[in-house]
């Protein structure tokens, strides 16, 4: 034994330096590990590049992470570098900016997590996510809890990630607490008008929201609101129908459209303060995941006409599915507000096409299969939230083709307007000076979302989209010029940037 030890002794310095090198390289990912491409200066060429001025055939010049030129057919005459990636007919579009993602990290990383969620994003063509302040633990409602978020995201994100903070009763009337959170860099706030399902994220009333808006006005940042208020109507149904809890229509009755309408009616009594000259001028209110395309939408349209600083989003699952199609016991489709009838879905599409719904977001809100799928298909007990992040681009495209949606509309709903809402001036468009955040995809290529399809989200089995046939295959994703995803492969290192407002 002793003899062996002595023989190994001369090797110790070598071993020690190997270990040190390992530690050093794990701390500082080499530039090459951030990207599957070696070049820092290159062209991305295609016959279909989606720019704010329309779809062009040409090339995008990328240098040092930014877009430095966008040229048409004659680009080759101006090529200052010979490194060209020619994608031919594939579409080159701004990367998607998802303003509504629950990554559940830290604290509930077994539900999703920064690494799995951002790898799924990269594979789906999303280049920026804005993480919601709840479903992680603790909720992001103070400077201290926000620091934990930032720490958890460090070197663990494959795309850029920004953060919303929470507006809750505890901080709503405490200006210095809210200012501390905003100064620390959250891009805006989020609140609920009904129980959120998360204990440390209690609901707010219209008076909390009014206070929140007056603080946000100074920072010119938005407030996201989950707009449903419990009414007697659905609440009583929940108790009466406990026996028939496997039927989707039972769940639907427990959250009628009147809940959305009541919440929006209350909200609009305070959003008038955001009008020019009003006490909350500079603040902005954004209604999350609208499902009711009838009375609620009429109220929103009217408030916009009156000059309220107001926008509204809906999500792919409200556009893809209808209540009539959801099988009894298939709790993958449970979300709040609920997916409503097919006629409502048609109205949502109409409102989106007419510009009354401003943007799309995923509301990717997963959990573990035990909480989503078990309980014998009980819709009243199952977790409410749809898992979708990796698929939102092909889903929007596949279901939208029937309505004649264009590539420009996709870029507007999924990149340009979301970036504007979050205050991200250098993102959301293929334009000179912007970050080179780009998705390359083939709209015409179809695929089956079956067990053989690579899914990077943590729990593929809970996604409502498994089993669908979709159109639109993502080939490559660039984040700040780094090729972070390419045909089934991710860059080795997580070099996404945490985005802090200032
Ligand atoms: C307001 O928030 C600050 C900072 O979080 C805290 O120190 C203070 O105790 C709070 N004030 C009240 C009245 O709760
Ligand atoms: C906003 O509407 C409420 C309710 O109708 C009203 O009491 C309030 O005066 C209005 N505020 C502004 C700034 O217009
Ligand atoms: Zn959500």
Image: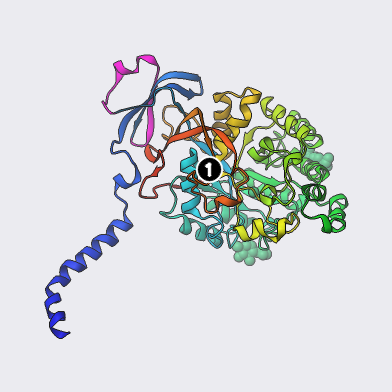
Does 210 appear in magenta? no
- In the image, 286: left or right of 219? right
126 vs 229: above or below: above
Horizontal and vertical percent position of residue 399: 63, 31
- State the image quarter where residue 342 is shown: top right
- Image quarter where the N terminus lies is bottom left
Horizontal and vertical percent position of residue 439: 46, 33
The residue that appears at 15% across and 75% down in the rendered structure is: 8
The residue that appears at 21% across and 68% down in the rendered structure is: 16
Horizontal and vertical percent position of residue 227: 74, 46
Marks counted in the figure total 1
Does 72 appear in magenta? yes
Q: Secondary structure at mark 1?
A: helix
Which portion, as a residue range, is magenta?
64-83
Type of colouring: rainbow
Badge 1: residue crowd in 10 Å (few <14, some 14–19, many ≥20): many
- State the image quarter where residue 25 is shown: bottom left
The reply to whether residue 305 is visible in this rendering is: yes
Horizontal and vertical percent position of residue 191: 68, 51
In front of the other: 270 or 353 = 353
Residue matched to label 1: 390
Regarding ligand 2, which quadrant of the image does it lie in?
A: top right
457 vs 485: above or below: below
């Amino acid at each position: 034994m002793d003899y062996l030890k002595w023989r190994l002794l001369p090797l110790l310095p070598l071993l020690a330096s190997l270990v040190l090198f390992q530690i050093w390289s794990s701390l500082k990912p080499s530039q090459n590990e951030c990207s599957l491409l070696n070049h820092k200066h290159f062209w991305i060429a295609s016959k279909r590049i989606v720019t704010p001025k329309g779809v062009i055939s040409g090339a995008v010049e990328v240098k040092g992470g930014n877009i430095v030129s966008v040229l048409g057919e004659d680009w080759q005459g101006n090529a200052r570098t010979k490194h060209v990636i020619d994608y031919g007919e594939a579409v080159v579009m701004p990367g998607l900016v998802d303003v509504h993602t629950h990554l559940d990290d830290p604290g509930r990383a077994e539900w999703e997590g920064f690494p799995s969620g951002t790898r799924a994003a990269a594979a789906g063509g999303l280049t920026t996510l804005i993480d919601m302040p709840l479903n992680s633990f603790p909720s992001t409602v103070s400077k201290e809890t926000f620091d934990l978020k930032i720490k958890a995201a460090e070197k663990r994100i494959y795309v850029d990630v920004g953060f919303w903070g929470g507006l809750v009763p505890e901080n709503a009337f405490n200006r210095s607490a809210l200012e501390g959170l905003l100064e620390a860099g959250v891009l805006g706030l989020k609140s609920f008008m009904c129980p959120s399902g998360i204990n440390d994220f209690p609901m707010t009333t219209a008076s909390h929201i009014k206070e929140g808006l007056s603080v946000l006005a100074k920072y010119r940042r938005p407030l996201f609101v989950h707009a449903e208020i419990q009414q007697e109507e659905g609440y009583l149904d929940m108790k009466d129908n406990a026996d028939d809890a496997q039927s989707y229509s039972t769940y639907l009755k427990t959250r009628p459209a009147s809940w959305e309408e009541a919440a929006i009616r209350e909200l609009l009594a305070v959003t008038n303060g955001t009008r020019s000259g009003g006490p909350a001028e500079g603040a902005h209110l954004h209604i999350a995941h609208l499902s009711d395309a009838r009375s609620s939408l009429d109220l929103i349209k009217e408030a916009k006409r009156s000059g309220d600083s107001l926008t509204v989003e809906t999500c792919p699952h409200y556009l893809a599915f209808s209540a009539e199609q959801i099988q009894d016991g298939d709790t993958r489709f449970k979300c709040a507000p609920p997916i409503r009838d097919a006629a409502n879905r048609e109205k949502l599409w109409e409102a989106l096409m007419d510009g009354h719904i401003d943007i799309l977001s995923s509301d990717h809100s997963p959990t573990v299969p035990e909480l989503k799928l078990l309980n014998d298909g009980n819709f009243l007990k199952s977790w409410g939230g749809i898992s979708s992040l990796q698929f939102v681009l092909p889903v929007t495209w596949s279901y939208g083709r029937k309505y004649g949606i264009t590539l420009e509309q996709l870029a507007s709903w999924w990149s340009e307007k979301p970036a504007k809402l979050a205050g991200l001036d250098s993102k959301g468009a293929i334009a000179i000076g912007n970050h080179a955040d780009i998705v390359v995809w083939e709209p015409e290529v179809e695929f089956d979302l079956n067990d053989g399809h690579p899914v990077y989200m943590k729990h593929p089995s809970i996604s409502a989209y498994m089993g669908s046939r979709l159109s639109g295959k993502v080939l490559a994703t660039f984040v700040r010029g780094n090729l972070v995803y390419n045909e089934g492969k991710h860059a080795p290192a997580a070099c996404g940037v945490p985005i802090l407002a200032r």
